Amino acid sequence: MPLENTTTAPPQTWDTTTTPAPTVAPPPPAGPTPDTPPKRKRGWLGWVIAALVIGGMAWAKMHYFPSPTAGEKGGKGGAAGGGKGAPGGKGGPGGAGGPGAKVPVQVYVVAATKLSDEVASTGSVMADESVTIQSEISGKITSLNIQEGQPVRKGQLLFTINAADVQAQLQKQEYNIKLYQDQEKRQRTLLEKEYISRQEYEQSQNALLTAQADLQALRVNLAKAYVRAPFDGILGLRNTSVGAYVSPGTAITTLSRVKPVKIDFNVPSRFAQAVRVGDPVAVTDEATTKKFQAKVYAINPQIDPASRTLPVRAIYNNANMELRPGGFVRVNLVLGETDEALQIPTEAVVPVASGYTVFTVKKGKAAVQPVNIGVRSDKVIQITKGLAVGDTVIRTGILQVKAGDRVSIQK
């Protein structure tokens, strides 16, 4: 094999006459110099600071930015079913706010209580008897014996109407009757002797009877001129004076019997079969807030088709005239009492589309229970179906609890 020709570059030479030859850099000194201070070793304080910074960043990462799988691991507290989660994050089972956490609630234990079945309504006070005093005939008032606001007795004269013409007609008719009586007596004697026919006698007898009837009619008209109280009561304010001309239908005053008074009110038709004569009625005067005890004494046989309510009337003796006719009252009709009623707080009942439900506690967990309600007030509701004595009902925390959640009962 032939050898390749190799050429060797000649060594580089420098013209020292024009350019000085480069000098070779001296080797670095073995020890420190004033321009290059000696290197210092890193101290233990730096390592501590670095470790703290790294640890803080790791804690912030785990606390504020948990990994998606952190909830599956849980911490030491999560394994125990409660407490604060460890590095597994607060989403772990048993971590704070996790699915295994207990919901704090307050409960009510159902017990049998006494309950009065009442119907609340509004009513009006009415006088036991009340009339407007009027004149039945036309004429001028000649006397007025009306003391406004004062009691009167039945048959007491209240006022009189000028009836001089009626009295004159009455006197005239009395004279005619005397004449007819004489004629009838003579005709009877002639009839007994058969001097006249029976028809002639009957004509004279009919004239006498007709005159007597006319006399009775005049006496009735004369009695209308003297207006008397139809019953015991209290007079109202009068609307006329002596000398005034009145006509039939003119209101003179009013007369009311206010001992006792009647109280009219309505109850919903669903209670129609439960109302009985004699049922107690609690009456509260809207003006004075005083309460009185009345009794049902009359029930309308028909339900009002417009309002679907049953008109009921109660009576109160009103011995001290506490209630005035025309007043507005609140009525509570007691339909019955029971000692075995189941009542729970109003806030424990949850309205739903199908009715009502409550949350009960069974084996430490919340459960939904449908119920039927009865009488209710602003504080308690009667449960007619769905609960039994001893059941535990959740009354607070209902918005946070769901069926199957574990609960922690708070006192």
Image (spheres, helix red, strand yellow):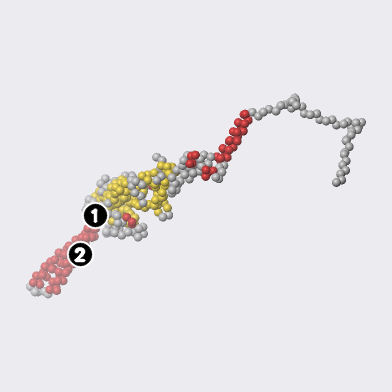
Can you see residue 285? Answer: no
Name the residue rendered at 56%, 37% in the picture. Answer: 59
Query: In x, y percent, where is residue 268?
Result: 34, 55
Name the residue rendered at 48%, 41% in the picture. Answer: 79
Q: Could you say whether the residue bearing mark 2 is in a helix, strand or loop? A: helix
Query: In x, y percent, where is residue 206?
Result: 16, 69
Query: In x, y percent, where is residue 262?
Result: 28, 52
Q: Could you say whether the residue bearing mark 1 is in a helix, strand or loop? A: loop
Residue position for label 2: 214
Name the residue rendered at 41%, 40% in the picture. Answer: 410
Q: Residue furthest top?
A: 34
Q: Residue furthest right?
A: 17
Q: Which mark is residue 152?
A: none
- Quadrant occupied by the C terminus: top left
Residue type at the position of mark 2: Asp
Local packing at callout 1 (Cα closer than 10 Å; few below 14, some 14-19, many 20+) is some
Taking depth in this image into account, of 92 and 334 the one nearest to the observer is 92
Q: Which mark is residue 230?
A: 1
